[in-house]
Image (tube, grey):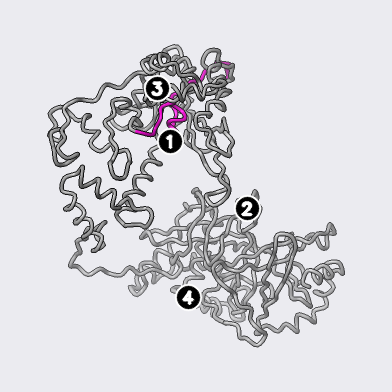
Amino acid sequence: MRWHHDHVYDGETMTHPSDSPAWRNFTETHPHFASEIRNVRLALSADGFQPFGQTGQQYSSWPVIMTPYNLPSWMCMKDEYMFLTVLAPGPKNPKDKLDVFLQPLIAELQSLWVDGTVTYDVHSRTNITLRAALMWTISYFPAYAMLSGWSTAGKQACPHCMSDSEAFTLPHSRKTCWFGNHRKFLPVEHPLRHSRNLFRRGRTVSHTARPTRSGFELLDELDSYGFLPSYEVDTEEHNKELSKLLAGGWRKRSIFWELPYWSSNMVRHNLDVMHIDKNVFDNIFNTLMNVPEKTKDNAKSRADLCRNVHKTRVAFRYWQRLISKGNIFPRKRRKTSSLKMVERYTLSVFKVVGRSIGASKSRHLQNNEYHAVATYMLLNCAETRSFVQMYENHLRSSVPGIYNADVDAQLQQHFFQWFKNYETLNQDFNISPDIKQLALGPQFKVKCLRGYCVNGFKFHTKEDSTHKATDNSGVHVRGVAGDGTSTNYYGIIDEILEVKYAGNSQSKTVLFKCTWFDTHPRLGTRVHPKYKIVEINRKRSLRYYDPFVFCTQASQVVYLAYPSTKKIISDWVYVGGLKKREYIQQIRSDTDQVDGNVANEAFQNHESQSHGLETQLLLNTQNLVYVTVMYDNDIDVGTQNSDTDDVQAFTDESSNNQSEDSE
């Protein structure tokens, strides 16, 4: 709350409202309020919206939001520091009656200015009398009339010129136009003041714009006219008659004039530039592109141009030529060098696809994570498979009769260090520089992502899915061990990491850090003997540490618990596969052959044989409707059916529930 006072203004770039002249004027005008730098300075913004959308029922609601400007510029406009103080209901636009809903807010602002409120300062551990003041309002142009009381329609719509406006009505289209009205703000000697061809035909400007009127002058004018606040009873007709009689822009006496300091504010109302920029851009773009029913180029507008503007035919011919050639937004030609560009060699593990979701944060890898990432990248890189084979041959020649499981363990524990210290790494010129960078290991600093879209799925971490109605953290990977056998691995995404390597900016990849469930056929994974439904014991996980997998190798699954309190059932969850987005998946028959390509499958240590099945789960909002099972014909399902231990592991309750759900 002290930042606005401690912030130093460089005198050139305005980075915070405290750098503005209006802020400094308020400080000089009210020194008693400014003496306590913790006093709150507020801004009020109002806008209408359709809660049912553009195609639904017409219903206009108007929220009023307050924002404290004591905070830094990167905090004061965040959602958590914007307070919804008033919500004017519909179904119609409140217009001048918005002051009725603002009465409690204005009364509280008056109390906070005069009396304040006793507040405990945690930083200084003292009680202070905290006061608050409203600096200005923020709105788009139509809402400006609702807050200020000055009409934004007609020839006097400009809140600066007011009755000094030089707007005129176009004779053919009957629209109000301010073309050339801005020339009075130019210096007296400026040549554009005397131009008769560039603006309205045959007209020059010699007078200057009147000075900006203060709040005291405007309030005296309102009181002299006799306008009343719109929240009082039977004031609407009174204000309308006064507005017609005076032929001015005032429509009411705004409720903000009841604030004791409002008249002394240098700036009382601000316009939202976003709405103005959008409306101006839409009109210009639709006219240039000749969008049907949205273009402003018609017979009446051309007739008005020919009457008021010089050389209109030349201008229209110029735009017509640009539109016909498609050169409305010409691109500058880049200078190309005569030198031949050398194609940058990129490893297969650095081909990042997909996109991240939400904000990210950085952290550093721990030693075990660093070793696991470096090893996983080397074992799954297509360009380093020859070195993996070289290391395996070295192990088998050194230890004759070594088991495949021991070879896999040695690869996980020592291959990264062996490859890093490989004696020919810096001598063999056939080795790519990218492989040398891969041998040095990744950077310790990684980027943690909240979610990631890849392979037609939207993945989220378990932490990010905790407070959501849907859970997108389930993941399935088909792993390939060193002996060539494949295994289905099911897990939960703990983190989504973007890992970078030294070198060019393309040397990076996205990994899922997962907690993998146990793949043991009796203790961790089981298959229903009849319906081939996969179940996972969520209480058991893999014994070894190998948590990482490429995002491109993962598919999404969902884990559904059974409605039972028995431990033999409650520990087990059903694994359901999900369909990819924007794809229509065809269910294969038993006679179809399965693609045996394992080039893009993940390298994982194995403890059990693959069950070779995938499930597709179709759900409605209430009940489980339909379950289909797809078989991989290259797996001997009959052998699994004869396993009596798997059959006995299923209780009658779970079997009956699954049978009813499948039917």
User: Along the polypeptide, which appears first: circle 4 or circle 3?
Assistant: 3
Point out the image quarter for the C terminus: bottom right
Callout 2: SS: helix
The reply to whether the C-beta atoms of the residues labelled 1 and 3 are less than 8 Å apart is no
User: Along the polypeptide, which appears first: circle 3 or circle 2?
Assistant: 3
Distance from label 1 to label 2 (Cα)? 41 Å
Task: Classify 10 Å Cα crowding around label 4: few (below 14), some (14-19), many (20 and above).
Answer: few
Callout 4: SS: helix
User: Along the polypeptide, which appears first: circle 1 or circle 2?
Assistant: 1
Whether 240 is drawn above or below 369: the answer is above
Residue 209 appears at what percent x and percent y? Answer: 24, 25
Whether 376 is drawn above or below 495: the answer is below
| Mark number, residue 142 | 1
Callout 1: SS: helix
| Residue under numbered circle 2 | 465
Question: How many numbered marks appear?
Answer: 4
The kind of residue tagged 4 is: Arg
Task: Classify 10 Å Cα crowding around label 3: few (below 14), some (14-19), many (20 and above).
Answer: few
Task: Classify 10 Å Cα crowding around label 2: few (below 14), some (14-19), many (20 and above).
Answer: some
Q: Is residue 186 left or right of residue 642?
A: left
Which of discs 1 and 4 lies nearer the camera? The answer is 1
The kind of residue tagged 1 is: Pro
Which of discs 3 and 2 lies nearer the camera? The answer is 3
| Residue under numbered circle 3 | 245
Residue numbers of the magenta segment: 125-154
Residue 605 appears at what percent x and percent y? Answer: 62, 70
Which of discs 1 and 3 lies nearer the camera? The answer is 3
